[in-house]
Amino acid sequence: MSQAVVDRLNTRFGGRILRWGEAFGDHEVRVALKDWGEVAQFMKDDAELQMDHFIDLTAIDYPERESARFDLTITMRSSGNSARIRVRTHVKDGEEPDTLSHVWAGANWAEREVWDMFGIKFKGHPDMRRILLYEEFVGHPLRKDYPIDKAQPLVPYREVGEIDKLPPFGIEEGQPFARIDWESRLAGGDNQVSPSIGVQQGQRRTLSDSEAAEQIQARIEVRMAREAEAAQASEETTEEGSGD
Amino acid sequence: MEPADELLNDEVALELSEDPMRLNMGPSHPAMHGTIRMVVDLDGETLVNLDVQPGYLHRGFEKSCERGTWAQVFPYVDRLNYVSPMLNNVGWALAVEKLLEIEVPERCQYYRVILGELSRISDHFTCNGASAMELGAFTPFLWLLKVRDWVWDILERETGARMTHSFGRIGGMAAPPTVNFKDDVLRLIPELHKVVKETEIMLLRNRIFLDRMQGVGVLTKEQALSYGVTGPVARSTGIPYDVRKDHPYLVYDRFDFDVPVGEDGDNWDRFMVRLEEIRQAIRIIEQAIEQMPDDGPINVDDPRIVYPEKDDVYTTIEATIAHFKLVMEGLRTPKGEVYSFTEGANGELGFHIVSDGSGTPYRVRVRPPCWYNLAAAREMLLGGMIADIIPTFGSVNMIGGECDR
Amino acid sequence: MPTFILDGKEIAFEAGETVMEAAWREGIEIPHYCWHPGLSVAANCRMCLVHVESGRQMAMPQLAFDEATGEYVPATKPKLQPACQLGAAEDMVVSSTNEQVQTAQASVQEFLLLNHPVDCPICDQAGECKLQDYYYEHQGTLKRKLTEPVHKPKGVRFGPTIVYDAERCIMCTRCIRVCDEVAKDHVLDMRERGNRSEIILAPGRELDHRYTLMTEHVCPVGALTSQDFRFKARVWFLKSAPSICTGCATGCNSHADYDPRNGKIYRLRPRDNADVNKFWMCDDGMMTYMRHDTDRLLMSTAGRGEDRMPVGEDEALGLAAEQLKNVEGATLAVVLSAQHSTEDNLALAKLAGALDADRLYLAALGGWEGDEILRSDDNNPNRAGATQAAGGAALKSVADLVADVQSGAVQGVLALGWATAEKLEELTPVADLEHVVSLASHVGALPAVAAVAIPVADTFEIDGSFVNAKGMTQAFRPVLPAPGGVEPAWKTISDLAGKLGKDLGFTDLQGLRQGLVDEAEAAQ
């Protein structure tokens, strides 16, 4: 059943199927990186193969292999006749395989994970960003040269677009417990330094009530000013357009 | 804490924005079943855009596997789908056995089937119970959890732990079945049927439940295939794919059971598919109990794969050396690559393992069924209302451990 | 070259070689216990049995189990030959993996383990034990014997360095052959026979020659263990790095086994080098690993006697520079070290040149006996290298330095290294000088008399090279990082030169080594 898939691919693509075989019950073919997208598309569209059920896409790192560092494999299945096949290609460090997210939607997340874990970018992927790890993560962990106990740098509090927020857990937000630095408080210091992470970055200290009010007021003013500006701008455009 | 009334003055009052509102759900959220973050863009109540952000429970399972031996992966694998850990154990054991090209004795195969199906039942109880609870039906949730705990009692008697058993071993199981195993299971089965029946009575004609589940979170067959969805979610869309039927492993080909397949691919179908699967799993268990031999070896008889008995290890040099080698270096597998797949509670649980010929895995890739199910959740939710996220997400049964690994 | 076929692979061999030797050269290991590339052939373990499939087949009678009748019936099996003794011949076809060979290997392994004590948890050889490895690869069955194993003496003290355990011994006689052939001292032999055999010492003797640790090194099991290494570390926690022994001018190649978790070297093992030490090292050399963390100089000091104070590195360099500025070049004695690498010595020689100091001396250890086997007469690894670094002419010794100090010709000393044959009392004239700077890795006589002592890194912590007694240059790489704040001597010297405002013409090791090459070429 799965051997039929191999045969069909061999018939269609001839020498572009670089290797094929069966090991431990799994059928597999290998293609060159440039044929990756085309072979995948064919496997989905072909009336005989109908490999419409996407199963998995992953990579394997062979850092000592000089010809190409990564293996990229995709497994798929035909819902019609339950045939299964694994297609493999070799990817050099820095090469970008074609995305298959337009062929099978499941490849979207699978490719994002391969990017996240291995650092292989996919050409034409609609959303090439990390999926399991956070944006500021340094490195690609499933590479063999990433030591498992590597410490990541502490990340500063992330600024998010137009969302105005104070970093969390300030005294003025009503949750003062466990965030008081007793050491400096007992030492008589004025600064009630909160032991939250933001402070360790030197970014913030807890605010007194008056300071909090001031900050809030300042933000309100900024927002009002911005909205006034926007209102101003839209008035001008309507003025300009009103001539029609 | 912001004094909002300060904003309300004549100039700024009540200008409603026309842009979609961006709302953040999770990762710490009671309905997010573990830790998933969803950033939704809402137009009123309708979802205009949805970004599902998994990864908050990523623990580096695949990287950790490369550090130990083949047998040391069992505790990791337990913690993948932690509501049906026996299925993960069995899946991993089968994967390495596929690489070694060995088959466990018959008694062990039945044992694995029974424990696996018990785990599957407990997973479906949890999923359906939680789904119901989130819609307000607290009582069926507790009924299902009550009977799930009875299942866990049996598993605890067999394996020593209620949840993360680490009971599978390459080439067998950690221990033979207890003396009362069959009786305990047979005694439990009527209770399982009873609770499933009670749940059905409670829920299946409830107007609210029907309205919130039927026609909500629809996934089409084509979408499911394209996303790589498997398991109850796929079957609810009409794809009759069950690994136990399509590529039978262990002794599943000896049992007479049905695979429930839905039509509409909505929450209702997923709920019903799971409910029916519980019944079918019970059917499998009954047949397996009947067919399972009462004596015979559980483990493969090869000191190079299975740890020898402790009395031998303490008294003979051969067993000591075998134990030493298996523990320190790990059992040696032939060099090669294999993809082994079983029917997990959420779908096709695959292990793609690469061996370099030593006792340490070179690469372990888990094909998590709910990873792709979750990717498809976007299709189910877009265009729906924000309140529909709750039952839909529950019916996808995203288990954080398996999804994020 | 003539070839034969082993397991389908063509192996080239030289006339007179055995199958085992030829395969070994190709990197193929036929399982063996008693064979060793550096010792004579004993062929008593029978683990290396192979089947010569070509040529006339010799058969042995046996009883084979007939499945059909359930009885043992007469049959024959091919006679297998030990590969260590089998001379390779052109066009011979040998199999070391076919079924008969596998059965033979399993049987040999089973017999070896028949009376073996259950010592793995306490045996030092665990993790590098051939019985363990071959059991897993070739036997893999559980014990069939039901009776009590034979008991023999355990923990027998053979000598000051070696402990013998007769129960673990597989009677391969490697230790006997090492003593005979390498140490040239027939002190070990076998007694009794059958399952009562054990290794014994010559009457009235102890295992006390200079290569006793080689018996432990060749022992494939845990029968011979080193008193020094026993129970100290488990080998699977140890990492290995290549190094060169600093015990004498032979420069035996070694593996330094260290535990990366605590940065400690636990032992040395000989590294094969056909040109230098073949497969062996002497006991004193094996013990030089202790130098790594014994008596180290770790902090810079200034002042002498009661005024000796620890100072920071930068301050120490400044003080040293001050000291050297106050000494005229002609009266400055620069002492090179025969224990330090050529690069370290070269850097110092360059500094001497920059300071116009042409009084060069060489500090070296003495009091050592060489032998015909491995030990050179000179117990300093790099006398030749230091001499080369100084320009090639023979250098005066520290005794000459003391004489020159006493005569007043020398007003200041800049010394590299801790090692000198003289004792502290003999260096008193130097201790009386005002300007004495010492760069040393260990506590010793030279740093003791210094006004400013600056620590430098030990051999195990630097990149460097030694020139041995035969004139061979051997490079080595660091095994462990130097303790915090301690630099290789060449770097400290470079920093010192910087403080003195001199440019030595190199900034890194590459530059310094290039200097070596340039000079060597210029000398030619």
Image: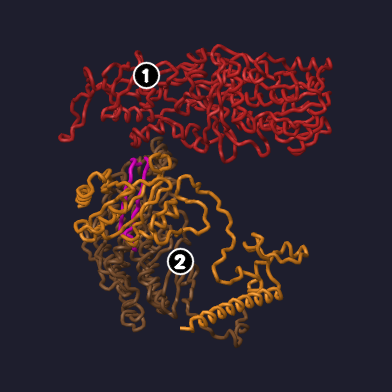
In the rendering, what colour is chain B? brown
Q: Gap between marks 2 and 1, in whole Å?
A: 67 Å
Mark 2 crowdedness (10 Å alpha carbons): few <14, some 14-19, many ≥20 = many
Q: What tint does the image give chain C?
A: red
Q: Name the residue type under label 2.
A: Ile
Could you tell whether C143 is left or right of C339 in the image? left
User: Is residue B66 covered in magenta?
Assistant: no
Q: Where's residue C140, x and y in %?
A: 34, 36
Q: Is residue C392 above or below residue C229?
A: above
Report the residue at 66% width, 32% height from top.
Answer: C491
Considering depth in this image, is C13 or B191 the residue closer to the camera? C13
Q: Which residue is mark 1?
A: C43
Question: Circle 2 — which element?
Answer: loop
C237 and C463: which is toward the camera: C463
- Coordinates of residue C347 in the picture (x, y in percent): 67, 26
Q: Is residue A196 visible?
A: yes
The amino acid type, in three-letter code, at marker 1 is: Ala
Q: Position of residue B331 (x, y in %)?
A: 38, 42
Q: Check the image and name the residue furthest to the bottom.
A: B10
Query: Residue A46 appears at what percent x and percent y?
Result: 22, 57
Q: Quadrant of the N terminus of chain C?
A: top left
Residue B160 visible at all: no
Q: Name the residue at 69% across, 15% down.
A: C395
**Residue occupied by mark 2:** B36
Magenta span = B333-356
B83 vs B141: above or below: above
Residue that sits furthest to the front in the current view:
A243
Where disc 1 sits, the SS reads loop
Give the color of chain A as drawn: orange
